[in-house]
Amino acid sequence: MVMDAKAATPEFFSATLPQNPGRIPVGRKTLLIPEMNRIASHLVAATFRGFGVTARVLGTYQGLDLGKEYTSGKECFPCQITLGDILYFMEKEKEGLGAAFDPAQYAYFLPESDGPCRFGLYSKFQRIVLDTLPGLQQLKITSVTTKDGYLPEGMIGPDKVLDLRKVAYFSFVVSDILDRLLWRIRPYEKEVGMADAFIEKAMETMEHAFERFALHKEFDRILDRLQQILQGGKEVVNPAIPPKPLVGVVGEIYLRMHSHANQNLIRMLEKYGAEVVNASMTEWVNYVSYDGLRGAKAEFLLYLKQCRFRPMIGYLKGMLAFGLDLLYQEHTQNKVYKRIHKIMDLPEDHKISHLEHILNEDDLYSFDIATEACLSIASIIACARAGYNGMVNVYPFTCMPSTTTAAIVKPYMNRLGIPYLDAPYDSSIQPGREAALRTFMYQAEQHFKHHGRTKSASPH
Ligand code: SF4
């Protein structure tokens, strides 16, 4: 039976709904946020609204046909999805607004990233496509590089930019916790549908909290509500259901987070008996800062050796900026997890320095090569050592860093005797996929029977 959302809603939800955040200005440019991770996108949009920016989350996956129409087939799957999302949105706005439709009134947020990866070219490619379509030349793409820490330009006063970045990061941490709460309670829910309905209402509550409290960085007030939600989440769990095999998911961030794109991988694993922990959003943000710090340090040392002081000072500043970012991020994350652990022992992220240490120990891969392979390979090893019963590497078909991960990790996991599955996706439905997941879950179940599971993440 699928429970209706109201029935699963504890009373505190309605008590926390704000009357009207009252800060959303009318008639200004609207910031469009693509939906990669559903909860994170909504909380980031709420954060922007809290700072007075009109922000909306783009609906996703309905425009996939358009995304395919304007790509050649050689692009990564997330590029097709994000392009389809913005084209579909514009088409629908045009239909709805008629003559009043003005593409110049929107800015589309699409972060960039450096490195040997096609992701850095998404915004340039999508700019070319938009420029070929009548009227869409005026639609601005707000794309900034990872060097700028994903900072949207021009829509917020310079005096508020740092605060906005701090709250946006905090919103990622909170969204990770809501996701982890869902994956913790759903396999043990009292009635089918109860956990999903609970988390949907929880997301709304947190959106309202960010709209109200973001501007003055009232983190404690947001955390008060988060603690109430965690407490309410315990009520969803049926304590009579015994613990299940614990499966970790790593891989390319978009596919890991976007449930349409990965054809509801987590739900499918749960259907065959798993409790799942997916790698987080914040892990990637921390990695960006860590990698920036690492790169600036390497350049600094190089110029120091050559006694070239002018460029050296530039890199010293870079080290300071990235170092302070990372320090702030890790401190914020620790603070939040410390508070929520009073209520539930949801798993924390690995520190990025720890992940680099793992890779160096076994000489499997180097952070010098960069990309998400650094995170995926090291996380798989960390989870295997921590007692997970199986690991899944999910990624877009042809994704370069994830294919590298697969090549390195598969023999390693074979030697350890821990079930491992590569799960590449594009928009097609692979006939053998469900059978592969079922077989993988059978192996994870056997591993669980013989070895038990990590004690640090207990459902009850
Ligand atoms: S990480 Fe993979 S999917 Fe993402 S841009 Fe790079 S190759 Fe494409």
Image: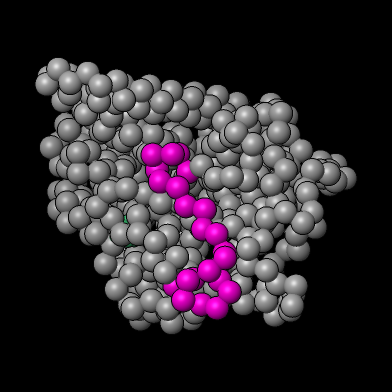
Q: Going by the image, does 175 lie left or right of 55?
A: left
Q: Position of residue 389 (x, y in %)?
A: 34, 49
Is residue 128 visible to the viewer in this orientation of the structure? yes
Q: Nearer the viewer, residue 96 or 207?
A: 96
Q: Nearer the viewer, residue 122 or 411?
A: 122
Q: Quadrant of the N terminus?
A: bottom right
Q: Position of residue 287 (x, y in %)?
A: 36, 38
Q: Position of residue 254 (x, y in %)?
A: 43, 57
Residue plotted at (14% across, 36% down): 362
**Number of disc labels:** 0
Q: Going by the image, does 102 lie left or right of 108?
A: right
The image quadrant that residue 340 belongs to is top right
| Extent of the magenta region | 129-150
Residue plotted at (55% across, 24% down): 335
Image height of 43 relative to 385, above or below: below
Q: Is residue 64 found inside the magenta-colored segment of the image? A: no
Q: Is residue 145 found inside the magenta-colored segment of the image? A: yes
Q: Nearer the viewer, residue 223 or 105?
A: 105
The image quadrant that residue 429 belongs to is bottom left
Image height of 75 relative to 195, above or below: below
Residue plotted at (40% across, 43% down): 146
Residue plotted at (32% across, 29% down): 293
**Which residue sits furthest right?**
19
Image height of 230 relative to 203, above or below: above
Is residue 274 visible to the viewer in this orientation of the structure? no
Q: Position of residue 405 (x, y in %)?
A: 23, 53
Q: Quadrant of the C terminus?
A: top right
Q: Quadrant of ligand 1?
A: bottom left
